[in-house]
Image (tube, helix red, strand yellow):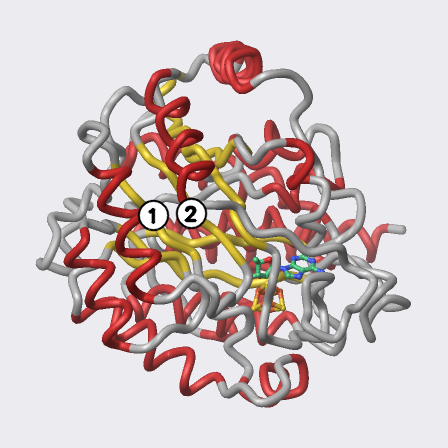
């Protein structure tokens, strides 16, 4: 008994030292990061979350940024083993929204006070470079609204044209920084190509978002440490982190789900390593725990992406089962989320919510 408590004391002490180093320097080695994330160090989990929460406050403040998410097509040419939208899932009912439908929702979002519209889809070549450019131009003409794209790996020319059409940000999760795991989970794809595309986005002047899943089959804590170091090396403006959730219509349907605890630890560690980044409390976190958004907002997150996709389509955007969906109208959702944010003593951001790092000058976070 005594030995156990000594052990605990020792773990506690080492963990605190590590946390202090992370807080002060914002840099840790792969080994140190792994220790920070390891489940046996759970005794100090709350210390990690509160360190991330105060770092969040210092770096990006109390305002929570709300983004309007439009999932406009669930067609996908890829076959990611984890995803319900994979091309080979012939049980998935597919849909595409028209340009008019998309622009109408963007209008509604702006009227409700959203300053950012996120256009997301599977990798769907039906939306050619020109079609997407036209949609971006129409949305940018509405008012001073920011457009974030999340359309997968596209050619340099397409990404360039969309930037010229007015797109401001691009989300492209790296999924996992372990190249072998990446190759196993993403047939016909390579991590190096993914990183090249992220580099293209950077060259083109986008605010860049990457991110990863937690609890993928065969993923080690050391892999998560690499994921975090990659975010730091890429100097991303945004990062999406969520648990892996097995989808029965995929080859990984019988694998274990990622845990909330490890996901929140990865999120908190991200806040310490990239303090000025926008970090959403992701839908996947909310999908595995009804308190998920609250917990994430208290462990480093400062963004919520609210789904404005019409319900008929939304229920078909099934990346994983039991994906959380806000009930009610877009107006009532915004209202109840605002109340949730106020209940935390936080505010809803009124600005565009650009990265606090001046664009084109990387690593300009004042901290
Ligand atoms: N569980 C959790 N997240 C998933 N994604 C895809 N499939 C799953 C799953 N089964 C994530 C990927 C992708 C994003 C659109 O959703 O990280 O980039
Ligand atoms: Fe397509 Fe994205 Fe799903 Fe992969 S994760 S199958 S790219 S929608």
* Ligand 1 picture quarter: bottom right
Residue 347 placement (x, y as % from top left): 38, 16
Q: Nearer the viewer, residue 118 or 196?
A: 118
Indicate whether 88 appears above or below 231: below
Q: Is residue 339 visible?
A: yes
Residue pointed to by mark 2: 119
Q: Residue at x 84, y 51 (%)?
A: 2
Residue 25 placement (x, y as % from top left): 29, 57
Whether residue 221 sits left or right of residue 57 in the image: it is right
Quarter of the image for residue 68 reads top left
Whether residue 216 sits left or right of residue 103 in the image: it is right
Q: Give the crowd class for mark 2: few <14, some 14-19, many >=20 residues within 10 Å.
A: many
Residue 283 placement (x, y as % from top left): 61, 41
User: In terms of sequence position, does the residue under pointer 2 or pointer 1 come before the other?
Assistant: 2
Whether residue 306 sits left or right of residue 352 in the image: it is right
Residue pointed to by mark 1: 148
Q: Residue at x 27, y 51 (%)?
A: 134
């Amino acid at each position: 008994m005594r030995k156990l408590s000594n052990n605990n004391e020792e773990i506690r002490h080492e963990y605190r030292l590590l946390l202090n180093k992370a807080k002060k320097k914002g840099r840790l080695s792969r080994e140190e990061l792994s220790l920070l994330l390891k489940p046996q160090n759970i005794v100090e989990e709350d210390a990690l979350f509160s360190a991330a929460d105060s770092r969040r406050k210092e770096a990006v403040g109390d305002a929570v940024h709300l983004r309007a998410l439009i999932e406009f097509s669930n067609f996908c040419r890829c076959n990611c083993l984890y995803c319900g939208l994979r091309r080979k899932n012939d049980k998935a009912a597919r849909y595409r929204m028209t340009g008019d439908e998309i622009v109408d929702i963007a209008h509604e979002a702006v009227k409700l006070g959203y300053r950012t519209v996120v256009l997301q889809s599977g990798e769907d070549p039906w939306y050619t470079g020109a079609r997407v450019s036209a949609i971006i131009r129409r949305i940018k003409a509405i008012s001073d609204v920011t457009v974030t794209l999340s359309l997968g790996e596209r050619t340099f020319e397409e990404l360039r044209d969309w930037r010229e059409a007015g797109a401001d940000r691009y989300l492209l999760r790296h999924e996992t920084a372990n190249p072998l795991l990446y190759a196993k989970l993403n047939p016909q794809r390579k991590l190096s190509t993914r990183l090249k595309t992220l580099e293209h986005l950077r060259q083109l002047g986008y605010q860049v978002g990457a991110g990863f899943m937690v609890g993928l089959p065969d993923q080690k804590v050391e892999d998560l440490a690499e994921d975090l170091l990659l975010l730091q090396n890429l100097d991303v403006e945004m990062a999406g982190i969520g648990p892996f959730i097995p989808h029965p219509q995929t080859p990984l349907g019988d694998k274990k789900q990622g845990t909330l605890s490890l996901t929140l630890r990865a999120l908190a560690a991200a806040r310490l390593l990239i303090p000025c980044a926008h970090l959403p409390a992701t839908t996947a976190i909310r999908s595995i725990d009804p308190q998920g958004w609250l917990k994430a907002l208290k462990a480093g997150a400062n963004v919520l992406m609210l789904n404005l996709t019409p319900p008929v389509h939304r229920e078909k955007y099934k990346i994983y089962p039991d994906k959380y969906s806000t009930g009610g109208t877009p107006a009532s959702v915004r209202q109840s989320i605002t109340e949730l944010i106020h209940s935390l003593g936080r505010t809803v951001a009124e600005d565009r919510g650009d990265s606090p790092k001046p664009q084109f000058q990387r690593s300009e976070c004042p901290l």
